[in-house]
Every structure is written in C-alpha cells, then in structure tokens.
Amino acid sequence: MHKLKAVFWDVDGTIADTELCGHRLAFNLAFKDFDLDWYWNENKYIELLKISGGLNRIIHYREMTHSDLSNDYCLKIQSRKRFYYKELVRSGKIKVRNGVLRLIKELADFNIEQFIVTTSGRESLDPFLNTSLKSYMKFFSKTITYEDVCNHKPSPDAYNLAVQLSGKSYLNCLAIEDSRIGVEAAILANINCLLTLPSWSSSFQNITKRANACVDSLGNNNNYSKLIYGKPLINNYVDFAYLKNIIN
C-alpha cells in the first residue's frame, strides 16, 4: 500500500480555464500587433494544444503555414502575447476550476507536499499565481516552469525534477493533468496521474486511457464530479481519500 506524499499540479486547463479564455485570446491580440493574418479560433487552438508551450506553438504554426518568420521574431510575438495574457489575468477573466481550491486546502490539511509543474513560462504564470491563487500559494513548496527544464511535456523532465526536489519516491507522488501530453509526461516519469478533463472537452471518446483515473472535474458539494474511467469515487468529488485509493 503506497502512501500519497506529494501532488504535482499542472496549471493551464487543470487549475484554471486559461487556455481558450486566456492564452488563445492573447495570441490573437499579439498576432494583430505584428500585422499577421493568423487567427486561432477555438477548434484550431484545441488542435495546437497538442504542442506544449506557447513559443513552441508559434514555431509549429509557422512551419504549418510555411511562413518565413525568424525564431527571434517568434520570440517577440510570444513576448507580446505574455503582455496581453497578463492584462487578461489582471482583469479577472481567468477563473479557477471547480473543486481546485477545496482540494489544495484539503491536501495541505493532510500535510501533502504540493508543487506546481507547468510548461508555461514564469512571466506568464506569475500574474495568475499572484491574483487568483495568491492566498493559496503558501500551500505549495515549489513552482516548476518552462525555464526550469530543457525538454517540455510530454518529456518527463519537469516531473522528474519535481520528484527529485520533493525527496519522495515516485511511488508516493501523483500528478493532476488535463491533457494527453501531460499524462504522457507523468507516465514517463513513472508517477501516478489523475486526468481532469478541460472544461472545453466535448467528447469522452478520444481521451487517453493511460491515467490512473479520469474525471470531468474535481468537483465539490454543489457540482459533483463525473467519473469517466478508473476506480469509483468514494464521495461525490475528488478528495484526499480518492487520490490515496487510485495510486494503489
């Protein structure tokens, strides 16, 4: 029986609905500033989420469209995108997902070490952490971002670093993710994973089945979790007892 000792949180799509209502809008505003005829609608952006990291998405799209933009120019676009994203965060348009704050506090009450493990850049992440999560950051030991590793999800580097910094056995760790590439990163690091589907997911048919369990949200007393696969929920939402159960 393995004890749960550390939980690693992804951010975009997992802790908050940042992707479609935040990053996507910021990208499109940045494209306008650089007089690009690029526009990422919701379907296109969901497709691009298969690529980890904002700069990597810009470069990938450059290749798709056979654009002659240089890497330095792509960096400038990404920098401008970060500006707009920070403005969106400060405006309060980025909301924390259902059940997240409840579970963070519950895990802290059970002395479970918690890390943020994301492939977002620190400059984009900090405004969100300092607003929507400000009063909860005391429950996190470390924050691992894009800048802390050379290879990004689905590479296991970020999670390997999290395990190393936690000082825990990988058997006692669990990641909470919202995407296939996040789950793959956790699996390659040999750690357990709960998949909580992003709010924009319209189908349960094409999701990865490789996580320990999958729910539509972490849930709470007012909005119950829907189990997609894995061990049955103990209560009506994801809690410490359930996380302990699914790693064994």
Image (cartoon, helix red, strand yellow):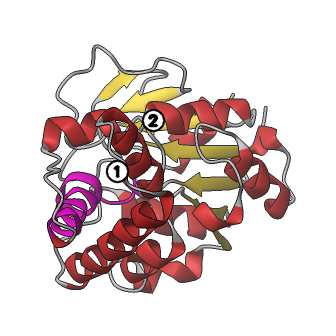
How packed mark 2 is, by other alpha carbons closer than 10 Å (few <14, some 14-19, many 20 or more), is many
Q: What stretch is highlighted in magenta?
A: 12-32
Quick check: 85 above or below 66? Answer: below
Where residue 98 appears, as percent x and y from the top left, is 27, 55
**Residue at the spot of label 2:** 195
The earlier-in-sequence mark between 2 and 1 is 1
Where residue 223 appears, as percent x and y from the top left, is 19, 48
User: At x 17% / y 50%, what residue is drawn?
Assistant: 38
Residue type marked 1: Gly
Is residue 4 at least partly visible in the picture? no
- Residue 20 magenta-drawn? yes
Q: Determine the main secondary structure of the stretch shown in magenta.
A: helix
> Mark 2, mark 1: which one is toward the viewer?
1
116 sits left or right of 218 in the view: right
Element at label 2: strand
| Residue at the farthest top position | 205
**Residue at the spot of label 1:** 13
Residue 100, quarter of picture: bottom left
Q: Nearer the viewer, residue 119 or 116?
A: 119
Image quadrant in which the C terminus is located: top right
Residue type marked 2: Leu
Element at label 1: loop
Image quadrant in which the N terminus is located: top right
Where residue 111 appears, as percent x and y from the top left, is 68, 67
Residue 41, quarter of picture: top left
- Residue 30 magenta-drawn? yes
Quick check: 28 above or below 203? Answer: below
Quick check: 204 above or below 102? Answer: above
| Residue at the farthest front position | 68
Q: Residue 107 carries which label?
A: none
Cα–Cα gap, marks 2 and 1: 11 Å
